[in-house]
Amino acid sequence: MTFGEIPMQQSTSLAAIPAVDRVLNFPAVQALAAEYGRAPTLVAVRGALDQLRELARGGALAADAVNEPRLAARVQSALEDAARPLLRPVFNLTGTVLHTNLGRAPLPEEAIAHAVEVMRRPCNLEYDLGGGSRGDRDSLVEPLLKELTGAEAATVVNNNAAAVFLALNTLGLRREVIVSRGELVEIGGAFRVPDIMARAGCKLVEVGTTNRTHLRDFESAISDKTALLLKVHTSNYAIQGFTAAAEEHELATLAHTHELPFMVDLGSGTLVDLSAWGLPKEPTPQQSLAAGADLVTFSGDKLLGGPQAGIIVGRRDLIAKIKKNPLKRALRVDKITYATLEAVLRLYRDPERLAQRLPTLRLLTRPLADIETTAQAILPALQQAFSHTAEVSIAPTHSQIGSGSLPIDRLPSCCVAITLRVKGKGEGSALKKIEQAFRELPVPVIGRVAEGAFRLDVRCLEDKNVSGFVEQLAQLRSR
Ligand SMILES: *Cc1c(COP(=O)(O)O)cnc(C)c1O
Protein backbone atom coordinates (compact mmCIF):
# COMPACT_ATOMS: atom_id res chain seq x y z
CA MET A 1 0.00 0.00 0.00
CA THR A 2 1.31 3.42 -0.85
CA PHE A 3 0.71 6.61 1.04
CA GLY A 4 -1.46 7.96 -1.79
CA GLU A 5 -4.03 5.21 -1.34
CA ILE A 6 -4.93 6.22 2.20
CA PRO A 7 -8.11 8.25 1.83
CA MET A 8 -7.52 11.75 3.12
CA GLN A 9 -10.02 12.86 5.71
CA GLN A 10 -12.20 15.47 4.05
CA SER A 11 -12.09 18.61 6.13
CA THR A 12 -14.52 21.47 5.88
CA SER A 13 -14.69 25.13 6.80
CA LEU A 14 -16.55 27.41 9.21
CA ALA A 15 -19.07 28.23 6.51
CA ALA A 16 -20.35 24.65 6.52
CA ILE A 17 -21.46 24.93 10.16
CA PRO A 18 -25.23 25.51 10.34
CA ALA A 19 -26.82 28.29 12.39
CA VAL A 20 -28.24 27.62 15.86
CA ASP A 21 -31.85 28.02 14.70
CA ARG A 22 -31.44 25.51 11.92
CA VAL A 23 -30.02 22.92 14.29
CA LEU A 24 -32.84 23.56 16.77
CA ASN A 25 -35.30 22.75 13.99
CA PHE A 26 -33.77 19.37 13.14
CA PRO A 27 -36.50 16.82 14.03
CA ALA A 28 -34.00 14.84 16.14
CA VAL A 29 -33.07 17.97 18.08
CA GLN A 30 -36.74 18.89 18.51
CA ALA A 31 -37.22 15.49 20.10
CA LEU A 32 -34.31 16.19 22.45
CA ALA A 33 -35.85 19.55 23.39
CA ALA A 34 -39.08 17.74 24.27
CA GLU A 35 -37.15 15.36 26.52
CA TYR A 36 -34.57 17.64 28.14
CA GLY A 37 -36.28 21.05 27.88
CA ARG A 38 -35.77 23.92 25.43
CA ALA A 39 -33.28 25.95 27.45
CA PRO A 40 -30.81 23.12 28.14
CA THR A 41 -31.09 22.05 24.49
CA LEU A 42 -30.23 25.55 23.33
CA VAL A 43 -27.15 25.53 25.59
CA ALA A 44 -26.14 22.13 24.23
CA VAL A 45 -26.58 23.22 20.60
CA ARG A 46 -24.49 26.34 21.17
CA GLY A 47 -21.83 24.25 22.89
CA ALA A 48 -21.76 21.70 20.08
CA LEU A 49 -21.47 24.41 17.41
CA ASP A 50 -18.68 26.10 19.38
CA GLN A 51 -16.78 22.81 19.39
CA LEU A 52 -17.22 22.48 15.63
CA ARG A 53 -15.98 26.04 15.06
CA GLU A 54 -12.93 25.26 17.16
CA LEU A 55 -12.25 22.19 15.01
CA ALA A 56 -12.78 24.15 11.80
CA ARG A 57 -10.29 26.82 12.88
CA GLY A 58 -7.74 24.10 13.42
CA GLY A 59 -8.54 22.65 10.01
CA ALA A 60 -9.73 19.47 11.70
CA LEU A 61 -13.45 19.58 11.06
CA ALA A 62 -14.56 16.49 9.14
CA ALA A 63 -17.14 17.25 6.45
CA ASP A 64 -19.59 14.69 7.78
CA ALA A 65 -19.43 16.12 11.34
CA VAL A 66 -21.88 18.84 10.31
CA ASN A 67 -24.57 16.55 8.91
CA GLU A 68 -27.88 16.29 10.72
CA PRO A 69 -27.52 12.91 12.47
CA ARG A 70 -23.94 13.56 13.64
CA LEU A 71 -24.83 17.00 14.94
CA ALA A 72 -27.92 15.68 16.74
CA ALA A 73 -25.78 12.95 18.30
CA ARG A 74 -23.32 15.56 19.51
CA VAL A 75 -26.14 17.61 21.04
CA GLN A 76 -27.59 14.52 22.66
CA SER A 77 -24.33 13.55 24.29
CA ALA A 78 -23.89 17.12 25.58
CA LEU A 79 -27.41 16.99 27.04
CA GLU A 80 -26.75 13.62 28.66
CA ASP A 81 -23.54 14.92 30.23
CA ALA A 82 -25.24 18.03 31.52
CA ALA A 83 -28.16 16.06 32.94
CA ARG A 84 -25.95 13.71 34.91
CA PRO A 85 -25.74 14.76 38.57
CA LEU A 86 -22.34 15.91 39.72
CA LEU A 87 -22.86 14.22 43.07
CA ARG A 88 -23.03 10.53 42.30
CA PRO A 89 -22.60 7.18 43.99
CA VAL A 90 -19.18 5.55 43.63
CA PHE A 91 -17.66 2.23 44.62
CA ASN A 92 -15.32 2.93 47.51
CA LEU A 93 -12.68 0.24 47.05
CA THR A 94 -9.89 2.33 48.57
CA GLY A 95 -9.75 0.18 51.69
CA THR A 96 -10.65 3.16 53.86
CA VAL A 97 -14.12 2.40 55.15
CA LEU A 98 -15.01 5.87 56.47
CA HIS A 99 -13.52 7.94 53.65
CA THR A 100 -14.01 11.66 54.24
CA ASN A 101 -13.70 12.42 50.51
CA LEU A 102 -16.22 9.72 49.63
CA GLY A 103 -19.01 10.77 51.96
CA ARG A 104 -17.97 8.87 55.10
CA ALA A 105 -20.66 6.58 56.52
CA PRO A 106 -23.17 4.88 54.19
CA LEU A 107 -26.54 5.10 55.90
CA PRO A 108 -28.71 2.19 57.02
CA GLU A 109 -31.94 1.48 55.14
CA GLU A 110 -33.98 2.45 58.21
CA ALA A 111 -32.44 5.94 58.11
CA ILE A 112 -32.93 6.30 54.36
CA ALA A 113 -36.60 5.33 54.61
CA HIS A 114 -37.18 7.74 57.49
CA ALA A 115 -35.50 10.60 55.62
CA VAL A 116 -37.53 9.96 52.47
CA GLU A 117 -40.77 10.21 54.43
CA VAL A 118 -39.97 13.49 56.12
CA MET A 119 -38.58 14.98 52.92
CA ARG A 120 -41.74 14.26 51.01
CA ARG A 121 -44.22 15.71 53.49
CA PRO A 122 -44.45 18.32 56.25
CA CYS A 123 -43.15 17.03 59.57
CA ASN A 124 -43.04 18.06 63.23
CA LEU A 125 -39.45 19.31 63.04
CA GLU A 126 -40.10 22.12 65.52
CA TYR A 127 -43.63 21.39 66.58
CA ASP A 128 -44.69 19.90 69.88
CA LEU A 129 -47.42 17.43 68.94
CA GLY A 130 -48.40 17.05 72.59
CA GLY A 131 -48.94 20.71 73.38
CA GLY A 132 -49.75 21.90 69.86
CA SER A 133 -47.16 24.65 70.07
CA ARG A 134 -43.68 25.49 68.89
CA GLY A 135 -41.22 22.74 69.73
CA ASP A 136 -37.48 22.20 69.92
CA ARG A 137 -35.84 20.20 67.12
CA ASP A 138 -33.28 18.73 69.51
CA SER A 139 -36.11 16.98 71.33
CA LEU A 140 -36.29 14.59 68.34
CA VAL A 141 -32.99 12.95 69.26
CA GLU A 142 -32.32 14.07 72.82
CA PRO A 143 -34.19 11.22 74.54
CA LEU A 144 -32.24 8.63 72.54
CA LEU A 145 -28.92 10.37 73.14
CA LYS A 146 -29.67 10.57 76.87
CA GLU A 147 -30.59 6.91 77.00
CA LEU A 148 -27.56 5.77 75.01
CA THR A 149 -24.90 7.96 76.62
CA GLY A 150 -26.26 8.57 80.09
CA ALA A 151 -26.08 12.34 79.53
CA GLU A 152 -28.50 14.83 81.11
CA ALA A 153 -28.99 16.70 77.83
CA ALA A 154 -27.93 16.82 74.20
CA THR A 155 -27.91 19.07 71.17
CA VAL A 156 -26.98 18.62 67.51
CA VAL A 157 -25.14 20.86 65.05
CA ASN A 158 -23.73 20.61 61.53
CA ASN A 159 -20.62 18.57 62.30
CA ASN A 160 -18.20 17.91 65.12
CA ALA A 161 -16.04 20.89 64.14
CA ALA A 162 -19.14 23.05 64.68
CA ALA A 163 -19.84 21.27 67.98
CA VAL A 164 -16.37 22.08 69.32
CA PHE A 165 -16.57 25.62 67.99
CA LEU A 166 -19.99 26.30 69.48
CA ALA A 167 -19.13 24.82 72.87
CA LEU A 168 -15.88 26.80 73.09
CA ASN A 169 -17.52 30.02 71.96
CA THR A 170 -20.30 29.58 74.50
CA LEU A 171 -18.17 28.68 77.50
CA GLY A 172 -14.82 30.28 76.75
CA LEU A 173 -15.39 33.57 74.93
CA ARG A 174 -12.56 36.01 75.79
CA ARG A 175 -11.26 33.59 78.38
CA GLU A 176 -8.69 30.84 78.52
CA VAL A 177 -9.01 27.18 77.56
CA ILE A 178 -6.33 24.82 78.81
CA VAL A 179 -5.30 21.91 76.60
CA SER A 180 -2.32 19.56 76.42
CA ARG A 181 0.40 20.20 73.81
CA GLY A 182 0.09 16.54 72.85
CA GLU A 183 -3.52 17.07 71.73
CA LEU A 184 -3.35 20.07 69.40
CA VAL A 185 -4.77 17.97 66.60
CA GLU A 186 -5.19 18.78 62.94
CA ILE A 187 -7.90 16.84 61.15
CA GLY A 188 -7.69 16.94 57.37
CA GLY A 189 -6.19 20.40 57.16
CA ALA A 190 -9.33 22.43 57.77
CA PHE A 191 -9.86 21.56 61.41
CA ARG A 192 -7.02 22.50 63.72
CA VAL A 193 -7.71 22.77 67.40
CA PRO A 194 -5.68 26.01 67.84
CA ASP A 195 -7.42 27.68 64.86
CA ILE A 196 -10.91 26.67 66.00
CA MET A 197 -10.05 27.97 69.43
CA ALA A 198 -8.95 31.36 68.09
CA ARG A 199 -12.03 31.71 65.87
CA ALA A 200 -14.25 30.75 68.78
CA GLY A 201 -12.79 33.74 70.63
CA CYS A 202 -10.90 31.70 73.21
CA LYS A 203 -7.31 32.03 74.28
CA LEU A 204 -5.47 28.75 74.00
CA VAL A 205 -3.27 27.87 76.94
CA GLU A 206 -1.03 24.96 76.00
CA VAL A 207 0.41 22.89 78.77
CA GLY A 208 2.89 20.04 79.04
CA THR A 209 5.00 18.75 76.18
CA THR A 210 4.26 16.87 72.98
CA ASN A 211 4.74 13.46 74.55
CA ARG A 212 4.06 14.05 78.24
CA THR A 213 1.49 16.17 80.00
CA HIS A 214 0.74 15.77 83.68
CA LEU A 215 -2.16 16.80 85.83
CA ARG A 216 0.09 19.31 87.61
CA ASP A 217 0.69 21.07 84.25
CA PHE A 218 -3.03 21.77 84.04
CA GLU A 219 -3.18 22.69 87.71
CA SER A 220 -0.49 25.34 87.50
CA ALA A 221 -2.09 26.89 84.39
CA ILE A 222 -5.46 27.48 86.04
CA SER A 223 -6.14 31.16 86.79
CA ASP A 224 -9.14 33.45 87.19
CA LYS A 225 -9.17 33.77 83.39
CA THR A 226 -9.66 30.03 82.86
CA ALA A 227 -12.98 29.08 81.25
CA LEU A 228 -12.60 25.32 80.90
CA LEU A 229 -10.25 22.38 80.63
CA LEU A 230 -10.30 20.56 77.31
CA LYS A 231 -9.21 17.07 76.32
CA VAL A 232 -9.01 16.24 72.62
CA HIS A 233 -8.97 12.62 71.56
CA THR A 234 -5.86 12.18 69.40
CA SER A 235 -7.97 10.43 66.85
CA ASN A 236 -5.79 10.41 63.75
CA TYR A 237 -2.40 9.76 65.31
CA ALA A 238 -0.85 8.00 68.26
CA ILE A 239 1.89 9.14 70.56
CA GLN A 240 3.86 6.10 71.61
CA GLY A 241 6.90 5.41 73.77
CA PHE A 242 7.74 7.66 76.72
CA THR A 243 4.33 9.24 77.11
CA ALA A 244 2.00 10.52 79.77
CA ALA A 245 -1.39 12.14 79.68
CA ALA A 246 -3.72 13.21 82.46
CA GLU A 247 -6.64 10.83 82.88
CA GLU A 248 -10.15 12.10 82.21
CA HIS A 249 -11.30 11.47 85.77
CA GLU A 250 -8.30 13.39 87.16
CA LEU A 251 -8.97 16.33 84.85
CA ALA A 252 -12.64 16.28 85.77
CA THR A 253 -11.86 16.35 89.48
CA LEU A 254 -9.32 19.14 89.00
CA ALA A 255 -11.76 21.19 86.93
CA HIS A 256 -14.57 20.71 89.43
CA THR A 257 -12.34 21.68 92.38
CA HIS A 258 -11.93 25.02 90.63
CA GLU A 259 -15.61 25.16 89.62
CA LEU A 260 -14.69 24.87 85.96
CA PRO A 261 -16.26 22.67 83.29
CA PHE A 262 -14.27 19.86 81.70
CA MET A 263 -14.93 19.11 78.04
CA VAL A 264 -13.83 16.16 75.91
CA ASP A 265 -13.71 16.29 72.11
CA LEU A 266 -13.91 12.63 71.18
CA GLY A 267 -13.95 13.02 67.41
CA SER A 268 -15.27 9.65 66.40
CA GLY A 269 -17.24 8.56 69.40
CA THR A 270 -18.90 5.25 68.89
CA LEU A 271 -21.69 4.39 71.30
CA VAL A 272 -20.76 0.75 71.70
CA ASP A 273 -17.71 -1.19 72.83
CA LEU A 274 -16.20 -2.18 69.50
CA SER A 275 -14.06 -4.88 71.09
CA ALA A 276 -17.25 -6.95 71.37
CA TRP A 277 -16.87 -7.42 67.59
CA GLY A 278 -13.14 -7.99 67.71
CA LEU A 279 -12.39 -4.41 66.69
CA PRO A 280 -9.93 -2.18 68.53
CA LYS A 281 -11.35 -0.34 71.52
CA GLU A 282 -12.36 3.27 70.92
CA PRO A 283 -13.41 5.58 73.76
CA THR A 284 -17.15 6.23 74.07
CA PRO A 285 -19.03 9.34 75.22
CA GLN A 286 -20.58 7.33 78.04
CA GLN A 287 -17.09 6.55 79.39
CA SER A 288 -16.06 10.22 79.29
CA LEU A 289 -19.29 11.26 80.99
CA ALA A 290 -18.88 8.57 83.63
CA ALA A 291 -15.32 9.83 84.20
CA GLY A 292 -16.80 13.24 85.01
CA ALA A 293 -16.72 15.15 81.71
CA ASP A 294 -19.29 17.94 81.67
CA LEU A 295 -19.51 18.04 77.88
CA VAL A 296 -18.55 15.55 75.19
CA THR A 297 -18.54 16.27 71.46
CA PHE A 298 -18.44 13.71 68.64
CA SER A 299 -19.24 13.23 64.95
CA GLY A 300 -22.39 11.76 63.48
CA ASP A 301 -20.74 10.27 60.40
CA LYS A 302 -17.61 8.67 61.76
CA LEU A 303 -17.85 5.44 63.77
CA LEU A 304 -21.41 6.29 64.77
CA GLY A 305 -22.28 5.48 61.15
CA GLY A 306 -24.89 8.19 60.67
CA PRO A 307 -25.31 11.49 58.83
CA GLN A 308 -22.88 14.39 58.97
CA ALA A 309 -23.60 16.01 62.32
CA GLY A 310 -21.91 17.14 65.49
CA ILE A 311 -23.35 15.88 68.73
CA ILE A 312 -22.87 17.59 72.08
CA VAL A 313 -23.93 15.70 75.19
CA GLY A 314 -23.50 16.59 78.83
CA ARG A 315 -24.67 18.75 81.71
CA ARG A 316 -28.15 20.21 81.34
CA ASP A 317 -27.18 23.78 82.32
CA LEU A 318 -24.25 23.86 79.89
CA ILE A 319 -26.28 22.42 77.00
CA ALA A 320 -28.98 25.03 77.72
CA LYS A 321 -26.35 27.80 77.51
CA ILE A 322 -25.02 26.38 74.24
CA LYS A 323 -28.52 26.31 72.77
CA LYS A 324 -29.01 29.97 73.67
CA ASN A 325 -25.88 31.01 71.77
CA PRO A 326 -27.10 32.81 68.59
CA LEU A 327 -24.52 30.80 66.65
CA LYS A 328 -26.53 27.64 67.35
CA ARG A 329 -29.01 28.92 64.81
CA ALA A 330 -26.25 29.30 62.24
CA LEU A 331 -24.94 25.80 62.89
CA ARG A 332 -28.17 23.88 63.26
CA VAL A 333 -29.16 20.98 61.03
CA ASP A 334 -32.25 20.25 58.98
CA LYS A 335 -35.01 17.66 59.08
CA ILE A 336 -33.10 15.22 56.89
CA THR A 337 -30.27 15.07 59.39
CA TYR A 338 -32.64 14.67 62.35
CA ALA A 339 -34.52 11.92 60.51
CA THR A 340 -31.41 9.93 59.66
CA LEU A 341 -29.74 10.55 63.01
CA GLU A 342 -32.83 9.48 64.92
CA ALA A 343 -33.09 6.26 62.89
CA VAL A 344 -29.40 5.47 63.38
CA LEU A 345 -29.55 6.12 67.13
CA ARG A 346 -32.59 3.85 67.36
CA LEU A 347 -30.52 0.99 65.92
CA TYR A 348 -28.11 1.38 68.84
CA ARG A 349 -30.87 0.42 71.25
CA ASP A 350 -30.49 -3.13 69.95
CA PRO A 351 -26.72 -3.78 69.93
CA GLU A 352 -27.21 -7.47 69.10
CA ARG A 353 -28.45 -6.68 65.62
CA LEU A 354 -26.35 -3.56 65.14
CA ALA A 355 -23.59 -5.22 63.10
CA GLN A 356 -26.10 -6.42 60.50
CA ARG A 357 -28.14 -3.23 60.33
CA LEU A 358 -25.55 -0.47 60.53
CA PRO A 359 -23.48 -0.49 57.31
CA THR A 360 -20.38 1.04 58.92
CA LEU A 361 -20.19 -1.66 61.55
CA ARG A 362 -21.20 -4.35 59.06
CA LEU A 363 -18.31 -3.37 56.78
CA LEU A 364 -15.82 -3.06 59.61
CA THR A 365 -16.73 -6.49 60.98
CA ARG A 366 -17.08 -8.25 57.63
CA PRO A 367 -15.48 -11.71 57.86
CA LEU A 368 -12.32 -12.14 55.80
CA ALA A 369 -13.74 -15.28 54.14
CA ASP A 370 -16.66 -13.20 52.91
CA ILE A 371 -14.36 -10.56 51.46
CA GLU A 372 -12.34 -13.30 49.72
CA THR A 373 -15.52 -14.72 48.19
CA THR A 374 -16.30 -11.32 46.69
CA ALA A 375 -12.77 -11.02 45.33
CA GLN A 376 -13.18 -14.46 43.67
CA ALA A 377 -16.54 -13.40 42.25
CA ILE A 378 -15.23 -10.32 40.46
CA LEU A 379 -11.86 -11.80 39.43
CA PRO A 380 -12.90 -13.40 36.09
CA ALA A 381 -14.52 -10.23 34.76
CA LEU A 382 -11.47 -8.19 35.65
CA GLN A 383 -9.13 -10.78 34.13
CA GLN A 384 -11.17 -10.65 30.95
CA ALA A 385 -11.08 -6.85 30.86
CA PHE A 386 -7.29 -6.82 31.16
CA SER A 387 -6.44 -10.06 29.37
CA HIS A 388 -3.94 -8.39 27.03
CA THR A 389 -2.30 -5.86 29.24
CA ALA A 390 -2.26 -6.85 32.86
CA GLU A 391 -2.10 -9.62 35.40
CA VAL A 392 -5.12 -9.66 37.69
CA SER A 393 -4.84 -11.55 40.95
CA ILE A 394 -6.12 -11.69 44.50
CA ALA A 395 -3.83 -10.45 47.24
CA PRO A 396 -4.07 -9.93 50.98
CA THR A 397 -4.27 -6.33 52.13
CA HIS A 398 -5.28 -4.24 55.12
CA SER A 399 -8.27 -1.92 55.27
CA GLN A 400 -8.38 1.02 57.58
CA ILE A 401 -11.29 2.49 59.43
CA GLY A 402 -10.65 6.05 58.31
CA SER A 403 -11.86 9.50 59.31
CA GLY A 404 -9.28 9.69 62.01
CA SER A 405 -10.64 6.67 63.83
CA LEU A 406 -8.27 4.14 65.29
CA PRO A 407 -5.32 5.30 63.19
CA ILE A 408 -2.88 2.51 63.93
CA ASP A 409 -5.26 -0.39 63.73
CA ARG A 410 -5.68 -2.11 60.41
CA LEU A 411 -8.17 -4.76 59.42
CA PRO A 412 -7.01 -7.81 57.42
CA SER A 413 -8.75 -7.70 54.06
CA CYS A 414 -8.48 -8.87 50.50
CA CYS A 415 -7.93 -6.99 47.28
CA VAL A 416 -7.85 -7.57 43.55
CA ALA A 417 -4.49 -6.34 42.29
CA ILE A 418 -3.95 -5.30 38.68
CA THR A 419 -0.29 -5.48 37.71
CA LEU A 420 1.05 -4.52 34.28
CA ARG A 421 2.73 -7.19 32.18
CA VAL A 422 5.36 -4.72 30.98
CA LYS A 423 7.40 -3.36 33.85
CA GLY A 424 9.73 -0.42 34.16
CA LYS A 425 9.51 2.84 32.25
CA GLY A 426 5.99 4.15 31.80
CA GLU A 427 4.55 1.71 34.32
CA GLY A 428 3.55 4.46 36.73
CA SER A 429 1.65 6.44 34.14
CA ALA A 430 0.03 3.29 32.74
CA LEU A 431 -1.24 2.43 36.23
CA LYS A 432 -2.58 5.98 36.52
CA LYS A 433 -4.46 5.43 33.24
CA ILE A 434 -6.04 2.26 34.62
CA GLU A 435 -6.99 4.14 37.77
CA GLN A 436 -8.58 6.84 35.62
CA ALA A 437 -10.47 4.32 33.46
CA PHE A 438 -12.10 2.93 36.61
CA ARG A 439 -13.03 6.45 37.69
CA GLU A 440 -14.72 7.05 34.33
CA LEU A 441 -17.12 4.10 34.65
CA PRO A 442 -20.84 4.95 35.02
CA VAL A 443 -20.55 4.25 38.74
CA PRO A 444 -16.96 5.34 39.27
CA VAL A 445 -14.73 2.80 40.98
CA ILE A 446 -12.18 4.34 43.35
CA GLY A 447 -9.17 2.18 44.18
CA ARG A 448 -5.56 3.05 44.79
CA VAL A 449 -2.17 2.52 43.27
CA ALA A 450 0.20 0.92 45.76
CA GLU A 451 3.25 -1.31 45.56
CA GLY A 452 3.28 -1.41 41.78
CA ALA A 453 -0.36 -2.37 41.31
CA PHE A 454 -3.80 -0.83 41.04
CA ARG A 455 -5.61 -2.30 44.01
CA LEU A 456 -9.30 -2.72 44.72
CA ASP A 457 -9.96 -3.59 48.37
CA VAL A 458 -13.30 -5.38 48.16
CA ARG A 459 -14.26 -5.08 51.84
CA CYS A 460 -16.82 -2.40 50.92
CA LEU A 461 -18.19 -4.22 47.87
CA GLU A 462 -21.21 -5.94 49.37
CA ASP A 463 -23.02 -8.84 47.71
CA LYS A 464 -25.98 -6.73 46.64
CA ASN A 465 -23.66 -4.53 44.53
CA VAL A 466 -21.47 -7.20 42.96
CA SER A 467 -23.53 -7.72 39.80
CA GLY A 468 -23.75 -3.98 39.11
CA PHE A 469 -20.01 -3.73 39.61
CA VAL A 470 -19.24 -6.59 37.24
CA GLU A 471 -21.69 -5.48 34.54
CA GLN A 472 -20.06 -2.14 33.95
CA LEU A 473 -16.59 -3.68 33.61
CA ALA A 474 -17.39 -4.48 29.97
CA GLN A 475 -16.93 -0.78 29.30
CA LEU A 476 -13.29 -1.03 30.38
CA ARG A 477 -12.64 -3.48 27.55
CA SER A 478 -14.14 -1.28 24.87
CA ARG A 479 -11.69 1.48 25.71
C1 LIG B 1 -13.03 14.32 63.10
C2 LIG B 1 -12.75 15.13 64.28
C3 LIG B 1 -13.26 16.43 64.40
C4 LIG B 1 -14.09 17.05 63.31
O1 LIG B 1 -15.29 16.35 63.15
P1 LIG B 1 -16.19 16.59 61.84
O2 LIG B 1 -17.45 15.85 62.14
O3 LIG B 1 -15.42 16.05 60.71
O4 LIG B 1 -16.40 18.06 61.75
C5 LIG B 1 -12.97 17.13 65.53
N1 LIG B 1 -12.22 16.61 66.51
C6 LIG B 1 -11.69 15.37 66.44
C7 LIG B 1 -10.86 14.85 67.57
C8 LIG B 1 -11.95 14.59 65.33
O5 LIG B 1 -11.45 13.36 65.23
Image (cartoon, helix red, strand yellow):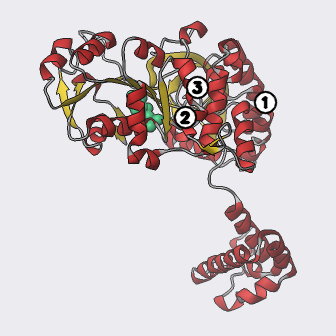
**Residue at numbered disc 1:** 464
Name the quarter where the N terminus is drawn. bottom right
- Residue 209 percent coordinates (x, y): 18, 20
Residue at the image point whose x is 24% and y is 39% from the top: 202
Residue 114 is drawn in which quadrant?
Answer: top right
| 261 relative to 155, above or below | above
Circle 2 crowding by C-alpha within 10 Å: few under 14, some 14–19, many from 20: some
Using the numbered discs, state the Cα–Cα distance from disc 2 to disc 1 in whole angstroms.
Answer: 23 Å
Residue at the image point whose x is 52% and y is 40% from the top: 101
In the foreground, 234 or 130: 130
Circle 3 crowding by C-alpha within 10 Å: few under 14, some 14–19, many from 20: some
Q: Nearer the viewer, mark 2 or mark 1?
A: 1
Residue 458 visible here: no
User: Furthest residue to the front?
Assistant: 131
User: Furthest residue to the bottom?
Assistant: 15
- Residue 50 percent coordinates (x, y): 62, 79
Question: Dividing the image into four equal quarters, which quarter contains ligand 1?
Answer: top left
Using the numbered discs, state the Cα–Cα distance from disc 3 to disc 2 in whole angstroms.
Answer: 42 Å
Mark before the other along the chain sequence, 3 or 2: 3
Image marks 3 and 1: residues in contact by CB distance under 8 Å: no
Instruction: Name which residue type carries label 1.
Output: Lys
**Residue at numbered disc 2:** 448
Instruction: Respond yes or no on whether mark 1 lies under 8 Å from ligand 1.
Output: no
Q: Secondary structure at mark 3?
A: helix
Using the numbered discs, state the Cα–Cα distance from disc 3 to disc 1 in whole angstroms.
Answer: 34 Å
In the foreground, 452 or 299: 299
Mark before the other along the chain sequence, 2 or 1: 2
**Residue at numbered disc 3:** 143
| 43 relative to 342, above or below | below
Circle 1 crowding by C-alpha within 10 Å: few under 14, some 14–19, many from 20: few
Q: Nearer the viewer, mark 3 or mark 1?
A: 3
